[in-house]
Amino acid sequence: MTRILIVDDEANIREVVREYCEMNGYETEEAADGEEAIALLKQMHFDVVVLDVMMPRMDGFTACREIRREFDVPVIMLSARQEEYDKLYGFDLGVEDYVVKPFSPKELMARIRVVLERRRSHDRKVIRYRGLEIDSLGRTVRVDGQKAPLTPKEIDLLLFLSAHPNIALSRKQLLEEVWNYDYFGDDRTVDTHIKMLRHNLGEYRDCIVTVRGMGYKFETR
């Protein structure tokens, strides 16, 4: 059974999301702030976290940062803040999607389904490149046998790059395929994640090649 964690300090919003989740066959748990959410994540498995930004005690951005450090669970962020900076900051933290309030519960359910399908769509495939091992189903990356400390979004980015070896991919393509949101002219999100991904790949960072004026590719030649 798919389980969704709904995190929002407004009880009426939690109730609406819970009702729609249950109508779609999902189990739910609720938390009123980031601290409660992290405590629940330590107790049980969740398939998706729906996380509000503006909350007391621990806000959504802080909670997302903590979640990324400890758990491999996709996060969909809810926020009344619709400035591009806030969205980019959320994606830089590793959120899967960003939904602006007020929102349509049906649209939120559709976005949850997309996230779940994306997580489940990978066939078991292990890509090996020198001492680098990428397991798409297990969503793990090993560098010389040691598990690399990648965030879920860094893993998504590496999976997409490595699934298209030796093919130059534009920043716009990467944003659309890995982040799944409209692109309005700021490619810093991709560049930031590439920088961190290269750092975590150590001596194999050179497998991610910069294509000047375009984007990046996973080079195996």
Image: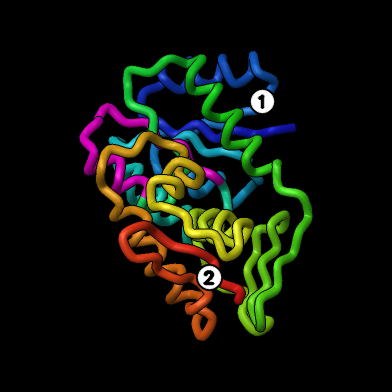
Q: Quadrant of the N terminus?
A: top right
Quadrant housing the C terminus: bottom right
Region rendered in magenta: 74-91
**Residue 83 shows up from this direction:** yes
Give the quarter of the image for residue 176.
Answer: top left
Q: How far from the left and from the top, in percent, is residue 13? A: 41, 19
> How would you rate the neighbour count of disc 1 (Cα within 10 Å): few for under 14, some for 14-19, many for 20 or more?
some
Please tell me whether residue 88 belongs to the stretch shown in magenta: yes
SS for callout 2: loop
Q: Alpha-carbon distance for marks 1 and 2?
A: 30 Å
Task: Residue under label 1, please give it.
Answer: 26
Residue 166 highlighted magenta (yes or no): no
Q: Quadrant of residue 159?
A: bottom right
- In the image, residue 56 above or below residue 23: below
Circle nearer the viewer, 1 or 2: 2
Residue 154 screen position, x and y as percent: 49, 60
Q: Amino acid at mark 1?
A: Tyr
Front residue (pair 7, 114): 114
* Vertical position of residue 178 compared to residue 79: above or below: below
Residue occupying the point 65% across, 84% down: 144
